[in-house]
Image (cartoon, rainbow, N blue to C red):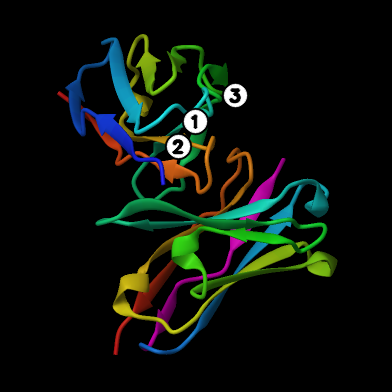
């Protein structure tokens, strides 16, 4: 299975900050990389699919980039509702695999 | 809009089975495959497999073969996952989701304890 390594595992930031979360795959995943946000007690929510495609209804402050094995989620200006845990997910190879998560907390 | 409504929390004994349901609404049920995902604090998120809601065809993560069985009832627009021979390691929140991942159920908690 492809291993997905997310960093950092914990990120402290303030409202208005620009933040980046990274995900590294153990092999090339050909941009088949999704990003999810999860809040406590809720299901994950799709933010970005296939590296850089913004899911309908997701604010444009979220963006994704990357290729090969290295991918990044960027939040351009952090809002209070953005705090939670973020996961990457590769669906290039079977089975799909998730990163370990990045908890984004208020500094 | 696409909605997936899962059944409630389950408390089960080791060695028993549970069957979780995922009722779809807001779209034509057979338009999207349904995936199932396991979430635990220790192991994080794990992809169990998916079912073709039209044909009933399935694809399982090797890790969950023999543990999970995915089925559908098209007449009620409901997908099911049965977990068998339960052990404490099966205690988790289980989610159903569309194959693209753009809609998820609310999760079903399964606790395995004697």
Give the image location of residue A78, x and y in percent: 32, 16
Give the image location of residue B110, x and y in percent: 41, 72
Residue B15, quarter of picture: bottom left
Circle 3 — which element?
Answer: loop
Residue at image point 45% right, 77% down: B10
Disc 1 or disc 3, which is closer to the eye?
A: 1
Residue A19, quarter of picture: top left
Circle 1 — which element?
Answer: strand
> Mark 3 or mark 1, which is nearer the start of the sequence?
1
> Quick check: marks 1 and 2 in contact, CB under 8 Å?
yes
Give the image location of residue A43, x and y in percent: 46, 47
Q: Are marks 1 and 3 on the same chain?
A: yes
Instruction: Report which residue position mark 2 lands on.
Output: A89
Circle 2 — which element?
Answer: strand
Instruction: Report which residue position mark 3 lands on.
Output: A57
Q: Is residue A67 above or below residue A92?
A: above
Q: Is residue A105 visible?
A: yes
Give the image location of residue A14, x and y in percent: 21, 17
Q: Which residues are magenta?
A: B1-13
Query: How much space separates mark 2 and mark 3, taking CA atoms?
Result: 20 Å
Instruction: Report which residue position mark 1 lands on.
Output: A34
> Mark 3 or mark 2, which is nearer the start of the sequence?
3
Residue at image point 70% right, 44% down: B2
Residue at image point 30% right, 84% down: B113
Query: How much space separates mark 1 and mark 3, taking CA atoms?
Result: 16 Å
Figure quadrant of the C terminus of chain A: top left
Determine the chain carrying the residue at label 2: A
Badge 2, how many Cα within 10 Å: few under 14, some, many 20+? Answer: many
Q: Is residue B108 visible?
A: no
Q: Are marks 2 and 3 on the same chain?
A: yes
Q: Are marks 1 and 2 on the same chain?
A: yes
């Amino acid at each position: 299975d492809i291993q997905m390594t997310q960093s950092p595992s914990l990120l402290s930031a303030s409202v208005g900050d620009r933040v980046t979360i990274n995900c590294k795959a153990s092999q090339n995943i050909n941009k088949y990389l999704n990003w999810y946000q999860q809040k406590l007690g809720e299901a994950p929510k799709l933010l970005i699919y296939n590296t850089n495609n913004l899911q309908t209804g997701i604010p444009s402050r979220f963006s994704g980039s990357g290729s090969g094995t290295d991918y990044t989620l960027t939040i351009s200006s952090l809002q209070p509702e953005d705090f939670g845990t973020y996961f990457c997910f590769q669906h290039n190879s079977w089975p799909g695999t998730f990163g370990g998560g990045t908890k984004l907390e208020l500094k | 809009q696409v909605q997936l409504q899962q059944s409630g929390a389950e408390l089960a004994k080791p060695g028993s089975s549970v069957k979780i349901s995922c009722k779809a609404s807001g779209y034509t049920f057979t338009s999207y495959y349904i995936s199932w995902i396991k979430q635990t604090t220790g192991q994080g998120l794990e992809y169990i497999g998916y079912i073709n809601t039209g044909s009933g065809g399935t694809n399982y993560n090797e890790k969950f073969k023999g543990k999970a069985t995915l089925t559908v009832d098209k007449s009620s627009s409901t997908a099911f996952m049965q977990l068998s021979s339960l052990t404490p390691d099966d205690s988790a929140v289980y989610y159903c989701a569309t194959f693209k991942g753009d809609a998820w159920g609310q999760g079903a908690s399964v606790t395995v304890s004697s």
